Amino acid sequence: MSIELLGYRPSVYTWAARLTLREKGLAFAWTEVDPFQEVPPAALLALHPFGRVPVLRHDGFALYETAAICAYVDEAFPGPALQPAAAPARARMRQVIGIVDSYGYWPLVRQVFVHGVARPRLGLAGDAGIRRAGLARASQVLDALERLAEDGACLSGTDWSLADFQLGPMIAYFAEDPDGAAELARRPRLAAWFAALSRRTAFRETRPPAEGG
Ligand SMILES: N[C@@H](CCC(=O)N[C@@H](CS)C(=O)NCC(=O)O)C(=O)O
């Protein structure tokens, strides 16, 4: 059995996949590939027509899209179950992952984190307008997640699932921006969930070193 993950160390989606593999207790080979180059590397394009990361390879099977990768990892290997058995909780998990993918990544990471944290960290100017627009859009996303956390079927901070592992890295990056941290603190359920996730060994030990990306 050989598992390989192609990813970019600072990428939040790659972090979600590494975290899931780690939570599942699986060893894997790592191939670093930078998708942000002007022309994505040919080796990546051969596996991912959109030139993004991560990509998982398991023996002869190659898979891209983080939600699909993480569900595959959970279902194809032994170890702790990372998806709830009950239909409502499983549906909430998928709903959170969908929200994160469709509405969360861009404002939380590409607008707020990149322009408020990553670019300044690299000595580059961030665009204040993009960051501000991202904070406004992020606020809507956080409100939706806070409401979903209310019934305890997801983001409970105790019953961990793939939803936690896909959202966590994005919230971690978002909260590196002081206004992002303040937005998180204004949502008590999400803030408590993120505090609990941050105490998890797997989350701490898979966190990428601070850099831009
Ligand atoms: N929907 C994709 C999104 C993956 C994604 O956007 N990854 C980012 C890194 S965090 C990327 O590869 N970006 C390259 C680019 O935007 O050109 C997934 O779930 O895997």
Image (tube, rainbow, N blue to C red):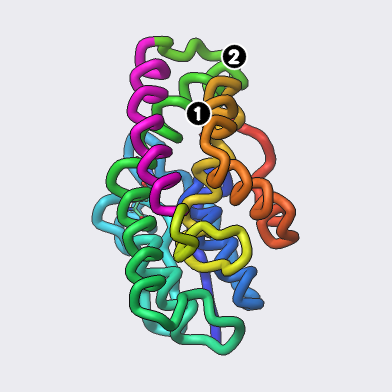
Count residues near mark 1 (Cα–Cα under 10 Å), then give few for <14, some for 14-19, many for 20+.
many
Question: Could you say where residue 39 lies in the image, as x and y percent from the top left?
Answer: 32, 39
Relative to 199, is 144 above or below? Answer: above
Rounded to the nearest angstrom, the CA distance separating label 2 from label 1 is 14 Å
Report the residue at 44% width, 74% height from top. 57
The quarter of the displayed image where residue 206 is located? bottom right
Question: Could you say where residue 106 lies in the image, as x and y percent from the top left?
Answer: 35, 36
43 sits to left or right of 20: left
Ligand 1 lies under 8 Å from the Cβ of mark 2: no
Q: For the magenta stretch, what is the residue range?
A: 129-149
Of 167 and 149, which appears nearest the observer? 149
Report the residue at 36% width, 38% height from top. 141
43 sits to left or right of 176: left
Count residues near mark 2 (Cα–Cα under 10 Å), then give few for <14, some for 14-19, many for 20+.
few
Of 210 and 139, which appears nearest the observer? 139
The quarter of the displayed image where residue 186 is located? top right
Residue that mark 2 sits on: 123
Question: Could you say where residue 72 lies in the image, as x and y percent from the top left?
Answer: 41, 77
Report the residue at 46% width, 53% height from top. 150
Tell me the tag on residue 113: 1
Relative to 189, is 129 above or below? Answer: above
Tell me the tag on residue 161: none
Task: Identify residue type, mark 2.
Answer: Gly
Relative to 154, is 113 above or below? Answer: above
Task: Identify residue type, mark 1.
Answer: Phe
Q: Who comes first in sequence, dot 2 or dot 1?
A: 1
Farthest-out residue, front: 151
Instruction: Give the number of marks.
Output: 2
Question: Could you say where residue 60 lies in the image, as x and y percent from the top left?
Answer: 39, 83
Res. 63 in view: no
